[in-house]
Image (tube, rainbow, N blue to C red):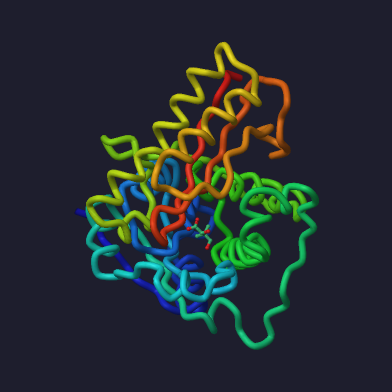
Amino acid sequence: MGDIEVFNTVVSLQSKLQSDYKKSKVGLVPTMGALHEGHMTLVQKSIEQNDCTIVSIFVNPTQFNNPSDLEKYPRNMDRDLELLKEQGDVIVFAPSVLEVYPDNYQTVKLDLGQMGLVMEGKFREGHFDGVVNVVNRLFEIVSPTHAYFGLKDFQQLAVIQFMTEKFSLDVKIVGCEIFREKSGLASSSRNQRLDESQLDKALVISLVLNQAKMSAKSKSIQEVIDEAKGTFEASSLELEYFQIVNPRTLMDLDEWIPGAHACVAAYCGKVRLLDNLQMTST
Ligand code: PAF
């Protein structure tokens, strides 16, 4: 069991960091709460690699394009703190919207080019503008040496890496493998909104990805995409996209390249789920 200290204001967090962790390795794990085992792998990695670990818990309103998704986003601070306590010593930063975006806040603009227009960028307008702003702001508040993001949000990680390079930020971005339930379902805070039967139905996502990876050994990209879409059509999920992309540029591929990545978004009932899998070795 570790010690958890919770800070709600920028000033109190910064004075703690100034007094105890000046010149230290500081790991930041940005989250929107509703923590699960996937987050815990990020927290563990940060604890291993740094002198102190800060977990931010902030449901960022600017990255939700759908008000009902924001309203329904699961929140459970007490449980989050319990889970974090089991990991070790952690500083929790749980600010209000006004702490993150004070009245004099200047919105940051970053042209993501094509990367911002595909997949999540296409289906969730403005989403990455929100992510760029909140992550940049958290970096400004915490000045971490390392920051941890899950590979489940594959495009988000690419966007954050791009932002870090463009703004010449002095922080190492660490991508962490997707944590999967025994069933194969990728861990996500949104899974908490699925009932028993939906948890079962959602398994089609990881099943299709694994099937696609097998097929990638002998079939063309178009054949793999058609097969995947066919499986979704026969399922009760509503597919938003299934794309096979270049892992760096996120552009659709028509020929296999090393590290080709399949990315999926699908609705299971009203819950939108994401997953991805590397199709070919690097
Ligand atoms: O991946 C998430 O939970 C969020 O997009 C993040 C990175 C915490 C920014 O709000």
In front: 231, or 50? Answer: 231
Q: Does the rendering let one see residue 6?
A: yes
Image location (x, y in percent) of residue 261: 59, 31
Q: Is residue 81 above or below residue 250?
A: below
Image location (x, y in percent) of residue 16: 44, 70
- At x 68% / y 55%, what residue is drawn? 122
In front: 156, or 93? Answer: 156
In the shown orientation, is residue 182 left or right of residue 261? left
In front: 87, or 193? Answer: 193
Q: Is residue 43 above or below residue 177?
A: below
- At x 41% / y 35%, what residue is drawn? 206
Quadrant into which the C terminus falls:
top right
In the shown orientation, is residue 158 left or right of residue 251? left
- At x 35% / y 71%, what residue is drawn? 6
Which picture quadrant has residue 180? top left
Q: In the orientation shown, which residue stands out farthest toward the front?
A: 234
Image location (x, y in percent) of residue 59: 46, 70
Image location (x, y in percent) of residue 267: 45, 53
In front: 260, or 105? Answer: 260
Q: In the orientation shown, which residue stands out farthest toward the left?
A: 1
- At x 54% / y 84%, what residue is drawn? 98
Q: Does the rendering let one see residue 149?
A: no
Which picture quadrant has residue 123? bottom right
